[in-house]
Image (tube, rainbow, N blue to C red):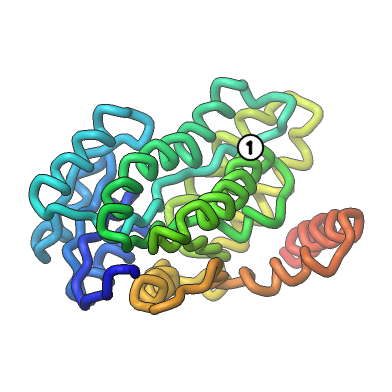
C-alpha cells in the first residue's frame, strides 16, 4: 500500500530562481514543506534561504550537478517525496534558420535534463512506495504557434513522456502530474523575441516574425492578459495535497480555452484561428 501522506513533504523545485519556480517554492514553504530550490542563479534565491529553504546551484544539463543535488537531499533528509520539474525555456525562430545545436539544447533542458533528474529520483520514491513527480508543461504542449517549433516539440514530447511514466509508476504509489500553464507573467516572453527576430533578420521570414513579435509585445503591455505565477503555484500545491491528483491541470489565462479549441478544431481551422488572432492583435494597435 502507498505510504500514508503526512502534512510535510521533502520537495525539490527546479528553476526556483524566478517565475513559476520561485512562486511555487514560496507557496510550498508557506504550506510547511521542506523545500529545496535548484537553479543556476543562486543569488536570486536569497529570499528562499531566509524563509528556511535550502538552495542549490544546479544546471539541469550537467550530470554532476544533478547527482550532487540528489545526494545532498537524500543525505540530509533520507527521502525525496515530491519533484517539481519546472526548469525550462523557449527557443523561437523559423525552423529553417534555427541551428540544430540550439534545437538540441532546447531538448537537453526541457526534456533530457528533466528525464535524467527524474531517473535518479524514482528509486528513492519507490523505496517509500510514495511520490509525486510534477512536470511543468504548457498549453503549448498541446497547441502551437508560429516560430515555436522546437519549443512546442519539446513540450509535446514532455506530455507523451509523462503519460508513459505515469503508467509505469502507478503500481509503486508514485503519481505523475502534468501542469499546463497558460499565459503567465514570467521572464519567459521577455527573453523570447530578440533571438527570434535575430534569427529572422534578412530572411524570407522577417516580415511575419516582426508582426508576431509586435503583436505579442503589445499583448505583454496589457497586464490583464497574463496571470501571475502564483496561480500555477496554487495548482501545484493542490496537486501535492490531493489524495488522488488529476493527471493534468490547465491553469492561467487562455489555457483552458486554447486547449478546448485545439480539441474541437481541425488542423486547418486551428491554423486559420491562430493567424486571424495574430492579424487582429496587430490591427487593434
Query: Could you tell me if residue 115 is visible in this image?
Result: yes
Looking at the picture, how far across and down is residue 186, in whole percent?
43, 58
- Say how many tags the image has: 1
Residue at x-position 69% and y-position 39%:
149
Quadrant of the rendered image containing residue 134: bottom left
Quadrant of the rendered image containing residue 92: top right
Residue found farthest to the front: 1
Residue at x-position 40% and y-position 52%:
86
Q: Quadrant of the N terminus?
A: bottom left
Looking at the picture, how far across and down is residue 161, in whole percent?
56, 47
Residue at x-position 48% and y-position 63%:
177
Quadrant of the rendered image containing residue 197: top right
Looking at the picture, how far across and down is residue 202, in whole percent?
73, 24
State the residue in front, 71 or 188: 71
Looking at the picture, how far across and down is residue 25, in whole percent?
27, 63
State the residue in front, 111 or 274: 111
Q: Which residue is mark 1?
A: 150
Residue at x-position 25% and y-position 47%:
38
Circle 1 SS class:
helix
Query: Could you tell me if residue 221 is visible in this image?
Result: no
- Left or right? Give the position of 206 relative to 59: right
- Left or right? Give the position of 209 relative to 173: right
How crowded pointer 1 is (Cα within 10 Å; few <14, some 14-19, many 20+) is rated as many
- Left or right? Give the position of 262 relative to 64: right
Q: Quadrant of the C terminus?
A: bottom right
Amino acid at each position: 500500500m502507498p505510504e500514508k501522506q503526512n502534512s510535510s513533504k521533502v520537495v525539490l523545485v527546479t528553476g526556483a530562481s524566478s517565475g513559476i519556480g520561485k512562486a511555487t517554492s514560496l507557496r510550498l514553504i508557506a504550506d510547511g514543506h521542506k523545500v529545496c530550490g535548484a537553479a543556476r542563479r543562486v543569488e536570486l534565491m536569497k529570499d528562499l534561504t531566509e524563509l528556511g529553504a535550502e538552495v542549490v546551484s544546479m544546471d539541469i544539463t550537467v550530470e554532476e550537478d544533478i547527482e550532487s543535488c540528489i545526494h545532498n537531499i537524500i543525505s540530509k533528509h533520507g527521502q525525496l517525496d515530491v519533484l517539481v520539474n519546472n526548469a525550462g525555456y523557449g527557443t523561437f525562430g523559423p525552423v529553417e534558420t534555427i541551428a540544430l545545436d540550439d534545437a538540441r539544447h532546447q531538448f537537453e533542458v526541457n526534456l533530457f535534463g528533466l528525464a535524467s533528474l527524474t531517473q535518479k529520483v524514482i528509486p528513492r520514491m519507490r523505496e517509500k512506495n510514495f511520490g509525486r513527480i510534477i512536470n511543468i508543461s504548457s498549453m503549448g504542449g498541446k497547441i502551437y504557434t508560429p516560430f515555436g517549433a522546437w519549443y512546442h516539440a519539446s513540450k509535446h514530447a514532455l506530455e507523451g513522456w509523462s503519460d508513459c511514466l505515469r503508467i509505469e509508476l502507478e503500481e509503486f504509489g508514485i503519481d505523475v502530474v502534468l501542469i499546463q500553464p497558460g499565459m503567465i507573467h514570467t521572464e519567459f516572453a521577455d527573453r523570447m523575441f530578440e533571438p527570434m527576430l535575430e534569427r529572422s533578420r534578412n530572411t524570407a521570414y522577417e516580415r511575419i516574425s516582426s508582426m508576431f513579435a509586435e503583436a505579442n509585445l503589445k499583448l505583454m503591455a496589457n497586464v490583464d492578459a497574463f496571470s501571475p505565477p502564483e496561480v500555477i503555484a496554487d495548482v501545484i500545491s493542490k496537486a501535492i495535497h490531493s489524495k488522488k491528483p488529476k493527471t493534468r491541470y490547465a491553469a492561467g489565462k487562455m489555457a483552458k480555452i486554447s486547449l478546448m479549441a485545439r480539441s474541437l478544431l481541425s488542423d486547418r481551422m486551428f491554423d486559420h484561428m491562430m493567424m486571424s488572432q495574430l492579424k487582429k492583435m496587430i490591427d487593434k494597435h
